[in-house]
Image (tube, rainbow, N blue to C red):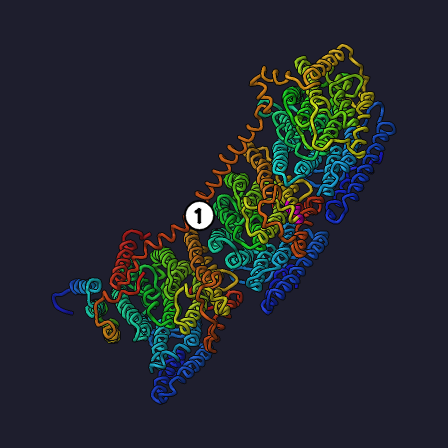
Amino acid sequence: MDILSLFVVVPVLTILALVFTKGLKQARQVSMVGSIIQLGMAVNLVISYFKEKAINDNIMVFTKDLVWFEQFNIHYAIGVDGISVALIVLTTIVVLAGVFISWKMPDLPKEFFISLLVLSTGVYGFFISIDLFTMFVFYEIAVIPMYLLIGIWGSGPKEYSAMKLTLMLMGASAVLLVGVLGIYFNSNADGGALTFNILEISQVNIPFEAQKLFFPLTFIGFAVLGALFPFHTWSPDGHASAPTAVSMLHAGVLMKLGGYGVFRVAMFLLPEGAMHWDWFFIILAATGVVYGAFGAIKQTDLKYINAYASVSHLGLVLFALLTLNKTAWNGAIIQSLSHGLLTAMFFALIGMVYGRTHTRDINKLGGLMKIMPFIGAIYVITGMAYLGLPGFSGFVAEMNIFVGAFQNPDTFQRVLTILAVSSIVVTAVYILRLVGKIMMGPLVNDDFANLPKATWYEKTGILLLLIPIVAIGVVPLWLSDMIMASLDPFIKGVL
Amino acid sequence: MDISYTILIPLIPLAVFLLLGIFNQKIKPAVSGYIGVAGLSASAALSFYTAYQYFFVVGKESGIYKTIVQKVTWMNFTDTLHIDMGVLIDPISIMMLIVVSIVSLMVHIYSRGYMKGDDGYTRFFSFLSLFSFSMFGLVLATNLFQIYIFWELVGVSSFLLIGYYYTKPSAVSAAKKAFIVTRFADLGFLIGILIMGYYTGTFDFETLNNPEGPAILNWASTSFMGLSVITWALILMFIGGAGKSAMFPLHIWLPDAMEGPTPVSALIHAATMVVAGVYLVARLFPMFYFVEDGFALNIVAYVGGFSSLFAAIIAITQTDIKRVLAFSTMSQIGYMMMSLGVSGYEGHEGVGYMASMFHLFTHAMFKALLFLAAGSVIHAVHSNYLKDMGGLRKYMPITNITFLIAALAIAGVFPLSGFWSKDEILVAAFEHNTLLYVVGVFVAGLTAFYMFRLYFGIFWGKDTQYKHEPHESPLSMTFPLMVLAFITVVGGLIHFSEYVSADKAGFEAHLNIPLALVATAVGLTGIILAFVFYKKENELPSRFAHAFGVFYKWTFDKFYFDEIYLFVTKKIIFNLIAAPIAWFDKKFVDGTMEGIGNKTVVISKRIKGIQSGKVQDYAFSFIAGVVILALVFIYLWTN
Amino acid sequence: MIAGISIYEILTVTSFLFFIGVYGFITRKNLISILMSVELILNASVINFVIINKYLYPDVLQGVFFSIFIIAVAAAETALAISIIINLYRQISSVEVKDTEIMKY
Amino acid sequence: MDFSSFLLMRQEIILLAIIILLLIAEIFIPKNKKSSIVHFAIFLFGIHTIVGFLSINECSIFGGSFQTNNLIHFFKNVLNIGVLILLLQSADWIQEKIVAQDKGTEFFILLFSSLLGMYFMISSGDFLMFYIGLELSTLPVAALAAYETSKRISSESGIKLILSAGLASGISLFGISLLYATSGSIFFHDIIGTISASNLTILGFILFFAGLSFKISLVPFHFWTADVYEGAPISVASYLSVISKGAAAFILMILLFTIFKSLMHIWENMIYVISIATMFIGNLFALRQQNMKRFLAFSSIAQAGFILLGLISGTQLGTTTVVYFIMIYIFSNLAAFGVVQAISSKTGKENMTDYEGLYRTNPKLSLVMLLALFSLAGIPPVAGFFGKFFLFTAAASEGFYLLVFLAVVNVTISLYYYLLVVRAMFLRKGENPIPFFKNKIYMRLGLIITVIGIIVLGLYSPLYEYIYELSSIYN
């Protein structure tokens, strides 16, 4: 078994093992073991990646290619570059943290963990695929468990949110499907065979007319998952209703599929289309950055705040991708990682607060720092990291994006860049409002005075996320260089 | 020369911070106090050692203090642009090291007494260490991005410390305000950095500040709206500096920041962090000076001058002693800015630069002293307000004396340190800009007046009856007062101009006797007026207040700037932007998506009638379908 | 071949027959009548087959055979339909088409 | 033509033999042992299904009236498997409800006759054989629909089916007569040579097409579907929706790709329009159905719209994808109907609200339903996704991107109502959930086979390759 396929096989085996478990205890232990194995594999992958990269300068390493549907030239083709490695590591971390956070899952635990792992299988598969078809398959596998996860284990208007989320995402993937087919049927433009293989298609000069037509489809198809304005409305409702671990996984990992897909498929394969449509989508993305931030100011539900914040932060990812600049791209990938970790952390914390106080309304919360110092402190730290404080991953990402975006002397793009940069102030406003309201100030509700402190598994989950956030923030060089090195093939397309 | 040991200066407080932060719950308060003081002492010792090495052993090379840089790449942006982390040693960074380490150490020691018995004792020390780390890092920064990084970190330390009493809503909102206002200013800073990075291709101070270097020589190559982009960058960066240094109109956070514990006010909001803006301008002084003939520098000068006047006027009417000191700080920083703004570059021309740095140094000492003394008073009477004080000289002799020394220093009375530095500033202003000179002198008078209003109000004035008899603070608190008082007395005697100058060559500064006399006279007038008004409780102040009428009220309400900001944030941003966006999002964006869904269901309901259950209707549709298909495909759509 | 009558006349007749059947199917109220209308439609086709065979392609008897089969199948169909109608009548004592509308929307 | 050529009709003959055997058995099995007829029928049909997999030669007998080739043979096998699953799923119901009324044997005989009709229909080489096959496949089903003689809706569904079918076959016949008029032959291979796009031919084609569309229930010829499904016994509805529809779609495809090939410019547009209409109407109606059978009826209408996407390309790719999709569709829909059947025969409940909380009481059944619905909706990794994706690929290969786009919009709509069922089963707890029950062996076997099919058909690519090879004759 090759190093990459394991990422699909191990979760599947874990799922099979879960089928035979009974009760919460067994289920969570099996999931934990499975997730820890995944984390170990991820670490191993990073090490092997650096080793392999030293002797192998292909775009993708660890490639493997098995014919699947010969007639369509569909292959099970896998391979990774620095970007996918980074995102795989992110996924393993968030999944493991998610398992810890779900340690006390009262209702249908087995099914919960199975769904969670199905989702992660889809995500892994998506990140390792270099075949559009396989990628699409995994994409949908990753999205559909959300319906059950939100619908069964969620809270509030969960049925509505689950349906909305699923339909919007699947609607997007439907649009994407047209785009994928369009790319496929133009992949013989240079006279070769039709192919789904990303690397092969990237060598083909797809006719401009086709690129113009299919770029928006592909872009929107993926970007909806990346919460592109104005297709983001599934995300606040979805996050608000989802159980903690699902919010974590969804915002932390699943939404990254959007940005990754935009980059890996839409922009890599249709560079001319990207340049043609750039002006339009970059307006949407920049609007999303500011819009999401302002949207977050007004919300009173913790999860809504975070969901809008995600719209803003992921808007920044899309914005960075559309600036067509290597530094900004680097920033976009780091932002994906950073946002993944941070938002997962936020959702975990929100889950802990909610689990204790049973409310997410910030007007009903206050002064919690005194009662749960650990959670409070981490909340403040996460807030600070979220608003781009140096020393945390968010800063590294944002600076790359801003510096990169600024490398284009075009006034139009400058204006949008400054607009996007200004979001850091608005971010500070809503984050501080949040932290100030719920953690600081006097205790608003005396019932809260005896709430339990954080438990060991909660702390473990939190630390799992915190460590990489700080690591990226303090020593960004290795990550930044690893990603940067993988960006060259992309930049050739648009320059 | 190997200066890598200087990296320890910031790293030791960082280690202390991590230690105290992570084991917050486990460490006994007393121990954490000692750890904090010990850490800072080590840093201070290293700072002094570095200063000694630099100024007297290795720093000077052919008459010029060289800039020593050691750095490593932290992150790469492009082939040319990257963020480095390292240390940069030159006269002003050394000077700042000294300032920060002395004040910080004193505040650490002081806090052991001041904060005794507080719940968050360990937390407090860990935050102080975090701040010290950040401030050292800022001071030692080698490039724009590094300074920005630590700039943000001091901002957050400030946030944490202002909000130290986090259960107090006023403290929380003050902390938020401070952070958001400075963050807003930092936006300017960041954009400035981006512009600078793009057009000069570097973030390094060395390259940027080289008068012969490309950054300065090519300033005119690109322009935007009539000004060089570099000028724009400098202006934007100055906005960042102005935010942190509480220059008008970004000053509103500073008075509120007094919600933090008093040692914090002394350290952050008087001596060190708030002068970061001055330091930034000084750090980039060659650029400010050479690019577009000092256009940006003029802005610095006027903003500084105006702020100093504005703050001094407000300070007169305030009744919260910490707020008076806060406005005083703002006023004095305006002074420094003004001084930088009127400075030249070479030799004696650069007296403004030197004076500004000198004043930064002396001001840090006496303002920290003032705050700590005020803290001592507050500690004793448990109130911030002048009305609750009076006649305290009998109870707190040491505090009284040290406060008096500091007040005299800030009023510019010979031979205290404030006299010397203020004099140099006025000299610089006199030589370059008469208007600003007049402002400077007037502000000097105002300063003397409000400081002594404060002094008399606290230590003399009415004989207040105290519930608990106030008593002198413990040694841990008075010791720092005495140390700082000592520096305040002797600090002026340092030949500052030999060490710190714009062109780094050093020059001989002379006392300009006439100007000194004018300044002293004005200062003494202020003191005497205050004496008349406030030595004994009397009717004069309220009569004068009446005489000024509306103007007094405006001043008392700080010219309604808080209200304006509140209006902008609450009414405009919150109600006119965020609320409509939230509404728009719900109704339109989400509404559209919902609408698509709902419409589908509605359509589905509407058309249910065609499935009528009547087999004849079905047959009719069948036939109609056939007929339509036949008509369409035989006659209309035949390709 | 019928003297004096061309294929057009006969086809016109069968078309009329066809449409009468269709009209009847759509308008009659009684299930039996509707069934008869179906028979009309089938008969129109039957005549069509025979006539086309006779007039246009007289050498092979495809049409004629086809019509025989149609008649046979139609008989089966009618028998089946009648039996279902009878069963329905047993339950609701009616053979009106309006009584077969309980399943709708 | 010697006697051995009858062997080429092996499947038809065996099926006929089974019918006769059942008739004989009906006579000889004593009244109190009538329930054994179910085992007997299933056993015989199982044998028939297995024997069906023996390969067969391409042939054309009776002067071209009857023809068969590997693809047709393969498709017959698919139909066999479908019917076998159907029998397994309805065995309990037949035992309990039908045999009790002493109508068990007839049920099988009618069902097999209908299947026999389909064999002849898809193997037909001329319009006569086609017509007879069509009627043979329809009329017994009408009888079956009205099988529950005590239920009014069953009779109503029977009468609706027989009348609509009569009308449809009448119109179809009229069309055939016109085609006969213009081409001079009822043999397909003759027609291919003479057909041209004259107005009369087109009219004839449209009339004929309408008749066949009735069976596939394409809009606007679909109205009978929901009512008949609702009223008919579940196994009959299931049979109509999968076997009957699949066979009709298959023969439509063969006819379009062979004799009407030269009219492609006409039927391409026609199918384009009808496909869109069918998908939208089917989905929009399915949205608000509460009765599971009605729900599945409209869902199957929408699925028929998707099948047209493969037809429209008119290529080997199209043939393959259509056959592949129908096969997957048979498994998926049978799984869904199987669950409905299981629940209905135990509790008599057929409404979506009755399914609330099903997962908590009957997890396995719910999972089968989940897989089936996901497969119908086209969610990977179950087979439906592959089927749909390839259909879309076929349409896109000829440049029908807009059609594909509208189809994927419909996939999203359809996902909505499939998820409504999932919602009822999994998300809701339900005040009065269906209590746990254990299925009998036949039902379990029937469901397991469908589940295996749903999972394996998509992931196991050689099957697709195999169909592709078989389809090369319709290139």
Residue B155, position in %: x, y? Answer: 67, 35
Residue B204, position in %: x, y? Answer: 72, 32
For this view, does B125 lie left or right of residue C66?
Answer: right
Asked if residue B451 lies in the magenta stretch, the reply is no
Q: Give the letter of the chain under mark 1.
A: B
Q: Which residues are magenta?
A: A373-379
For this view, does D287 lie left or right of residue A85?
Answer: left
Q: Is residue B303 visible?
A: no
Query: Residue B352 sits in which quadrant?
Result: top right
Residue lying at the far top in this picture: please name it: B514
Residue lying at the far right in this picture: please name it: B57
Residue B355, position in %: x, y? Answer: 75, 20
Q: Where is mark 1, residue-wise? A: B593
- Quadrant where the image shows the C terminus of chain C: bottom left
Q: Is residue B455 visible?
A: yes
Seen in the picture, residue B258 relative to C12 is either above or below; the reply is: above
Q: Main secondary structure of the magenta part?
A: helix
Residue D17, position in %: x, y? Answer: 37, 83
Q: Residues within 10 Å of mark 1 (few under 14, many from 20)?
A: some
